[in-house]
Image (tube, grey):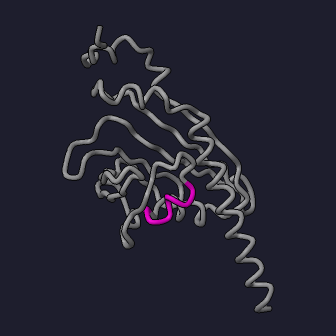
Amino acid sequence: MTEQTPDASVFDSIDPVLKVVTAEIEISAPAEAVFELIADPQLQPEWDGNDNLGSAVEGQRVQGAGGSFIATLTKGVDRENHIVDFAEGRRIAWKPSEVGGEPFGQKWVWDIEPTGDDTVLVRHTYDWTELRDPKRLSRAQSTTAANLLASLKRLKQLAERLRSGAWLTAAAEA
């Protein structure tokens, strides 16, 4: 017996609380530096903890809501990411789609909150409350806080390593 693909009504039976996944981490780096690593799509594959992002062309740094950027996934598929929320240095959110298409319904959100001198709390949220494509259900359900935390840990490692490198350069020049 073959398994049938569910129709969009399956989404109505899933508790909305389960459709929003969040993880957070504290990073010892300035908010501007952390935000830059997120806002520049060309840098995203360096900290993607799920090895899903392959590459993005230079010059697509996100400047505000209403724009988009295109990234190539590791499986070779291009995705257009529509910026739906933006506050420079503080928040960025996007919804992926096929290039030129309407967003699928998932939203990736990054919030950066300064917590001290050159220390920030970074909150990463995956929200699929608007997803209605049954073919994407399994992948949405399999994206857990652990997946988000893997990216946050790599972002932390990269941001703190870059910060240390900047300190070494400044110390050498002094």
| Residue 56 against residue 138 in the figure, above or below | below
Q: Residue 3 at what x, y percent from top left?
A: 31, 13
Q: Name, please, the residue furthest toward the front.
A: 1
Direction from residue 56 to residue 31 in the image, left or right: right
Whether 45 is among the magenta residues is yes
* Image coords of residue 43 (percent x, y): 50, 64
Lateral position of residue 152 relative to residue 170, left or right: left
Q: Position of residue 144 (x, y in %)?
A: 55, 31
Q: Residue 81, relative to residue 107: is it above or below?
A: below
Residue 100 appears left or right of 71: left
x 62%, y 48%: residue:
152
77 to 158, vertically: above or below: above
In magenta segment, residue 162: no
Judge whether 15 appears above or below 128 on screen: above
Q: What stretch is highlighted in magenta?
A: 41-47
Residue drawn at x 57%, y 38% as measured from the top left? 147
